[in-house]
Image (cartoon, rainbow, N blue to C red):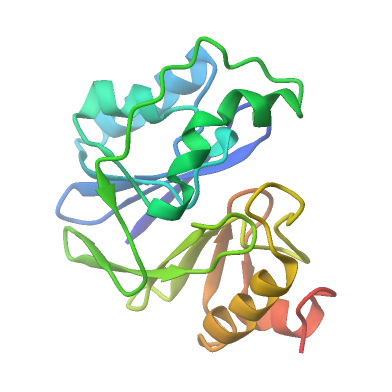
Amino acid sequence: MKIKIFEFGPLAVNTYVLSDETGECVIIDPACWYPHEKETLFNYIVNNNLTVKHLLNTHLHFDHILGNDFVVSKFGVKPEAHAADEYLLKKLSTHSQMFGVDISHLSVPPLGIYLKENDIVSFGNQQLHVIHIPGHSAGSLVFYNKAANCAFVGDVLFNGSIGRTDFIGGDYNQLVEGIKNKLFVLPDETVVYPGHGPVTTIGNEKKYNPFVGI
């Protein structure tokens, strides 16, 4: 599986495009906000002859869905996320104002598919296993590819940190419990692709993360 990482938007979100030899792909957390970012994402898809099969959102905070409408309009897919986060779509402007970002003109497409624990998202020859780990938001999801030995964790877990829990729907204890019980049971060599910042591994976080290290 090929993994392309883009850093998009005013809050530097990691947007991922996953593809394989079939030419099918998924986009995780399209955060393209500025025109050149949208052009960059579009050109990557087109120039590599990729067919977008899924638009996946790890959660529905504003910074992770800034490019949802663009992807919907260009590639004809619908956003997929956990139902517990759907209410956040009505609170995007309030949340963005906390970071000094004006999204008043942002068009927000509704969810097309609801994902939940143990669902499997398929594309090409790949399978992403859906893991629900609330705490950063009520509907935060992780997409785990066992065969490729990697997990796309959104803002659940970072290199040396964890997601904020002071937003609406946040719960520190719930987040820590979910990380320990659902992520730290994965192989230590599992590569962790977070919503912000550098890549890490499960083993590294178990050993060194001051919030959840064991």
- Is any part of residue 7 visible from this angle? no
Q: Where 40 falls versus 118 (above or below)?
A: above
Quarter where residue 204 is shown:
bottom right
Q: Residue furthest right?
A: 210
Q: Residue furthest top?
A: 105
Quarter where residue 70 is shown:
top left
Residue at position x 23%, y 65% in the image: 126
Residue at position x 61%, y 23% in the image: 93
- Is any part of residue 53 visible from this angle? yes
Look at the image and tell me in which quarter the N terminus lies: bottom left
Residue at position x 48%, y 48% in the image: 85
Q: Where does the image place residue 106, in percent across and percent down from the top left?
A: 48, 16
State left or right for residue 112 relative to residue 163: left
Q: Where does the image place residue 73, in percent across and percent down from the top left?
A: 26, 21
State left or right for residue 103 relative to residue 58: right
Look at the image and tell me in which quarter the C terminus lies: bottom right
Residue at position x 77%, y 52% in the image: 166
Q: Where does the image place residue 146, in percent across and percent down from the top left?
A: 36, 78
| Total numbered circles | 0
Q: Where does the image place residue 209, in percent across and percent down from the top left?
A: 79, 74
Q: Nearer the viewer, residue 139 or 50?
A: 139
